[in-house]
Each structure stands twice: as C-alpha cells, then as structure tokens.
Amino acid sequence: MAENFKAKIAFVSSGPSSRPHYGSLTPLIPKDVSVDFKGLELYGDRLYEIEGKKDLIVRKIGELVKEYNWDGVMVTAAPPEVLNPGLLDELRASLSVPVTTALNACVAALRAFSVTRVLLLTRT
C-alpha cells in the first residue's frame, strides 16, 4: 500500500546524491513528509567547478520538480549560491513550488532567534 504524504520535498545537492551524512537527517523528517535526496552531479574533485552554472542549476532543478512532482525544494550548501549570485531569485522566479537555499534558511533561522552577531568558521 502506498503511503500518503502531506508533502514531497527535495533536498538537492550540486554534487552526488549519496553522501554519508544524509542518513543522519532522516530522524528529523516528519512521518507525513517524504524527502528525496537528489544530486545534480555538477562537480568532480573540486566544488568550485559549479561556479557560473546558475542557468544549468535552475534548469536541472526545474526538470526534477516536474519529474518528481515535488512540493518544495531545499538547495543544500552555501557554495552553489555564493558561486552563482542571484541563484535563489532565479529559482524562485522559475519554479512553481517554494524553494530555499542553505544561506536563506540560515538567515531565517538566525532572525527567528533574534541573533544579532554571528561567528562564521569554515575551511577550504
């Protein structure tokens, strides 16, 4: 018997679909929500290979929304947006479903907690 989900959400990565940490997210997903983990496979050894691929990212995600009938899209990691300025705006303009990016979601979370100062640590 098929399960009835209230929402079918996409978790889209610019890299591969299979990452070991994706499994750790499943306990956070509500029972009535289905999450598809999809990778666009846009880079090999270097994440910076996605720079300047905004149009390709938008097109591929649009195709996947239609193919999988998603109700919403989450684009993971900051680099796709940092290396492709305007990505969120173009996704919102071209998709028929709600979309967020890692940077957008982080800002929303910080605002929800009234955070006024942030320390950002990263590695290259």
Image (spheres, rainbow, N blue to C red):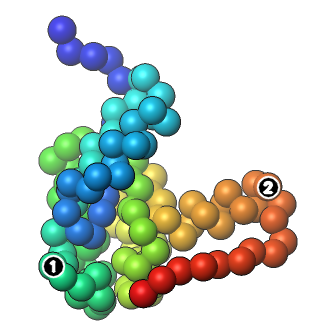
Q: Farthest top residue? A: 1
Q: Mark 2 falls on what kind of element?
A: loop
Note whether 64 is above or below 76 in the view shown: above
Q: Nearer the viewer, mark 1 or mark 2?
A: 1
Given residues 107 and 6, the one toward you in this image is: 107
Total numbered labels placed on residues in the image: 2
Residue 82: x %, y % from top left: 45, 84
C-alpha gap between disc 1 and disc 2: 37 Å
Residue 44, numbered circle: 1
Res. 31 visible in picture: yes
Quadrant of residue 71 within the rendered picture: top left
Left or right, residue 9 beside residue 89: left
Q: Is residue 60 visible?
A: no
| Residue in the picture at 26% in, 56% down | 19
Q: Position of residue 72 (x, y in %)?
A: 40, 47
Residue 113, numbered label: 2
What residue lies at 27% left-to-right and 43% top-to-bottom? Answer: 36
- Quarter of the figure that contains the N terminus: top left
- Badge number at residue 29: none
Quadrant containing the C terminus is bottom left
First-in-chain label (1 vs 2): 1
12, above or below 49, in the image: above
The structure residue drawn at horizontal position 65% and vertical position 67%, both measured from the top left corner, is 107
Apparent side of residue 118 relative to residue 100 in the rendered image (left or right): right
Amino acid type indicated by mark 2? Phe
